[in-house]
Amino acid sequence: MTVMTAEIEAELIRIFNRFDHNNNGFIDEHEFSQVLDSLGYDDSAEVRSLEFAAIDDDEDGKVRFREFADWWLDNR
């Protein structure tokens, strides 16, 4: 796992905010699908939903920055 330095955290905040279109501090499932599109993922909607559910640790239907950062660092 990659260590979260201040520089990496700043970059991840920039990426997170790019996809948090309504600026509510969360990425919803639709916004997360756009993250996957930008990364070139070619998965079905079902697979994308499963991936979203896997990173939504508290199962509230929203991905917070920390959840997103953990996923990003584990998968990039």
Image (tube, rainbow, N blue to C red):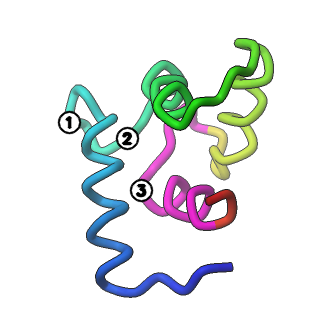
User: Over which residues does the magenta segment extend?
Assistant: 60-73
Q: Secondary structure at mark 1?
A: loop
Q: In the current view of this chain or complex, which residue is farthest to the left? A: 23
What predominant SS class does the magenta segment belong to?
helix
What residue sits 46% from the left and 24% below the top? 34
Task: Look at mark 3 in the image and give the residue it sits on.
Answer: 65
Instruction: Give the amino acid type for the residue marked by disc 1 in the picture.
Output: Asn
What residue sits 27% from the left and 70% below the top? 10
The numbered disc on residue 72 is: none
Q: How many dots with numbers?
A: 3
Q: x, y (%) of residue 70?
A: 59, 64
Q: x, y (%) of residue 26?
A: 37, 41
Task: Look at mark 1 in the image and give the residue it sits on.
Answer: 23
62 relative to 66, above or below: above
Instruction: Give the amino acid type for the residue marked by disc 2 in the picture.
Output: Phe
Q: Residues within 10 Å of mark 1 (few under 14, many from 20)?
A: few
Question: Going from the N terminus, do you reach mark 2 or mark 3 first?
Answer: 2
Q: x, y (%) of residue 12?
A: 37, 61
The C terminus lies in which quarter of the figure? Answer: bottom right
Relative placement, left or right, of 20 versus 41 is: left
Q: Residues within 10 Å of mark 2 (few under 14, many from 20)?
A: many
Viewer-proximal residue among 55 and 61: 55
What residue sits 20% from the left and 36% below the top? 23
Q: In the current view of this chain or complex, which residue is farthest to the front? A: 40
The numbered disc on residue 26 is: 2
Viewer-proximal residue among 64 and 58: 64
The Cα atoms of the two marked residues, 2 and 1, are separated by 7 Å
Confirm whether the magenta stretch covers residue 67. Answer: yes
What residue sits 46% from the left and 31% below the top? 38
